[in-house]
Image: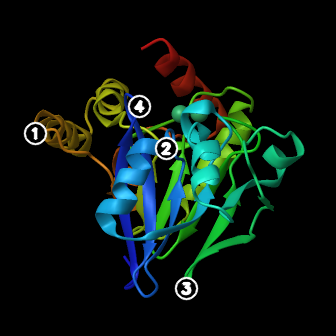
Amino acid sequence: MTAGCRVVPVACLQDNYAYLVICEATGEAAVVDPSEAAPVEAALTREGVTLRAIWNTHHHLDHVGGNEALARTHPGLAVVASAFDHRHHRVPAQTAALADGESARVGRLQFSGILVPGHTLGALTLCGHGAAFTGDTLFLAGCGRLFEGTAAQMFGSLGRLGALPGETRVYPGHEYTVKNLEFAAAAEPDNREVAARLLEARARRKQGEPTVPATLEEERATNPFLRARDTTDFARLREWKDHF
Ligand code: ZN
Ligand code: FE
């Protein structure tokens, strides 16, 4: 991670993660995908930082559920999501609309938005300082379901994320890693890195620890959806996983 930027996962609901993105120079923070306000407020107090912005990866309730309460208790809060979701008025309290390639800032930190349609048509990944907040597009060892987009769109979006530097730390919207690796082991029974990663992820969860983040390099070695050859191959895997 680039010096000066710290990421704190905040467990929300059943298996969601919000993340505090902290600018250490100024003590200011953005929160990615606040599912609910209370655990985010607790984390802000614990870390002793000031909330300046909400960054939403997409409009689903388990990612925006805390927006309104946080906007009320933190006057002047910037609420940033995609221009697509802004046009559709579907992110509560949204104040700023990012088009593909545009940036969001907190303190001295700058993150750029990559539009990644597939799970939803307005899905955004926020990327900067060696971190990528991928929402329900790229999970560790998996990817999101196709609720609004096509297999071709999702395959293209994963291709863009897969091209980020290998040391990029991936912070997804849910703790789905063990189930995803069980699928990966079925899809690629001869992949030893998948088998090893599954054991490691199970051990972490048994200790009550999060599996996040992972590096993109690990993902390229073990995530069957990033390893799909083409749209047809991706669609076959996605369909299989939907019923796995
Ligand atoms: Zn979602
Ligand atoms: Fe979700």
Q: CA–CA distance between discs 4 and 1?
A: 19 Å
Are the residues at dot 3 and dot 2 in contact (C-beta closer than 8 Å)? no
Looking at the rendering, the quadrant in which ligand 1 lies is top right
SS assignment at label 2: helix
| Image position of 106 (left or right of 12) | right
Q: Position of residue 146 (x, y in %)?
A: 65, 28
Compare marks 3 and 1 and give the one earlier in the sequence.
3
The residue indicated by pointer 1 is 207
Instruction: Kindly identify which residue carries mark 2.
Output: 37
52 relative position to 211: left or right: right
Residue at 35% across, 70% down: 48
Query: Residue 227: which numbered mark, if any?
Result: none
Are dots 3 and 1 in contact, CB under 8 Å?
no
Q: Nearer the viewer, mark 4 or mark 2?
A: 2
Above or below, 177 relative to 25: above
Mark closer to the chain start, 3 or 2: 2
Answer yes or no: is residue 117 visible. Answer: yes
Q: Amino acid at mark 2?
A: Ala
Q: Position of residue 2 (x, y in %)?
A: 40, 82
Residue matched to label 4: 13
